[in-house]
Image (spheres, grey):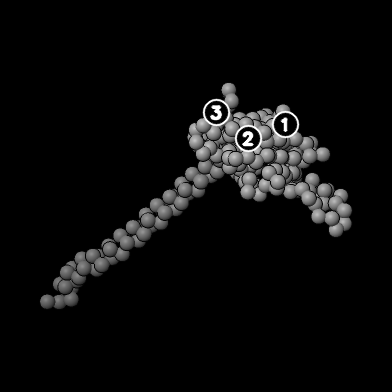
């Protein structure tokens, strides 16, 4: 058999060896295009979520506890929020074994002094900044002669007070820096038994909050 007679038999074999090569390249190209498409879709989705989050921040800030209860305590003493006052929402996670009262504060007009008398029931005070989150907490274990007292102020107000302090004189008042000018003080009194509720409410609402100047 001559080489010419063998040529037709070799041609199909050469074609079969080239077809898988082109198929592999096509599959690779489709995979790359799919990866690029999924990446672009992920970036677009992330951008949409980011924009929605930015737009919702003001709405969420208006619904945080320091905004909802900002007007409470304007009379100089904490006001009960358990049960919630008329027209105001209840706490997200109310504790049936405790009583809560709040004082809203605004430091733009000056520092605020918080004074709480301790009693037979456990008492705790927490400072909540505007926008949510606890910035400071203290319990009746830190009371001096049955009194918990501290002054809430901004960093600028603290710097002014430090500049006014006498050289070598240690400030006797406990100074707490609030990360935001607005916020609230939450007084929480724990109940040992249901019959303690009246005493707990009296203790929580006895917390004073007024100007420190």
**Contact? badges 3 and 2 (CB < 8 Å):** no
Structural crowding at the residue carrying mark 1, measured as other residues with C-alpha within 10 Å and reported as few (<14), some (14–19) or many (≥20)? some
Q: Residue 74 location in percent, x, y?
A: 71, 29
Secondary structure of the residue carrying numbered label 2: helix
| Residue 76 numbered tag | 1
Residue at 63% across, 49% down = 141
Identify the image quadrant of residue 15: bottom left
Distance between the alpha carbons at the discs numbered 2 and 1: 15 Å
Structural crowding at the residue carrying mark 3, measured as other residues with C-alpha within 10 Å and reported as few (<14), some (14–19) or many (≥20)? some
Secondary structure of the residue carrying numbered label 3: loop
Residue at 68% across, 39% down = 116
Distance between the alpha carbons at the discs numbered 1 and 3: 20 Å
N-terminal-most mark, 1 or 3: 1
| Residue 203 numbered tag | 2
Image quadrant containing the N terminus: bottom left
In this view, the mark in front (2 or 1): 2
Secondary structure of the residue carrying numbered label 1: loop
Observer able to see residue 179 = no
Residue at 59% across, 25% down = 85
In the picture of the structure, the residue carrying the numbered disc 3 is 83
Q: Identify which residue, 136 or 133, lies in the foreground.
A: 136
- Answer with left or right where residue 126 lies relative to residue 45: right
| Residue 89 numbered tag | none
Identify the image quadrant of residue 157: top right
**Contact? badges 2 and 1 (CB < 8 Å):** no
């Amino acid at each position: 058999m001559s080489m010419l007679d063998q040529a037709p038999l070799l041609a199909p074999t050469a074609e079969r060896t080239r077809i898988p090569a082109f198929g592999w390249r096509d599959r690779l190209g489709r995979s790359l295009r799919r990866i690029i498409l999924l990446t672009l879709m992920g970036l677009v989705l992330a951008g949409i979520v980011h924009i929605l989050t930015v737009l919702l921040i003001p709405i969420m800030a208006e619904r945080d506890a320091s905004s909802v209860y900002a007007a409470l305590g304007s009379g100089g003493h904490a006001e009960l929020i358990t049960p919630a006052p008329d027209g105001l929402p209840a706490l997200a996670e109310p504790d049936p074994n405790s009583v809560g009262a709040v004082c809203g504060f605004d430091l733009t007009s000056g520092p605020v002094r918080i004074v709480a008398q301790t009693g037979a029931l456990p008492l705790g005070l927490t400072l909540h900044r505007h926008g949510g989150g606890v910035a400071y907490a203290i319990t009746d274990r830190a009371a001096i002669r049955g009194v918990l007292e501290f002054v809430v102020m901004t960093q600028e107000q603290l710097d002014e007070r430090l500049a006014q302090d006498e050289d070598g004189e240690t400030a006797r008042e406990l100074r707490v820096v609030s990360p935001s000018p607005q916020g609230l003080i939450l007084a929480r009194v724990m109940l040992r038994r249901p019959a303690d509720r009246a005493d707990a409410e009296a203790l929580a609402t006895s917390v004073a909050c007024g100007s420190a100047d």
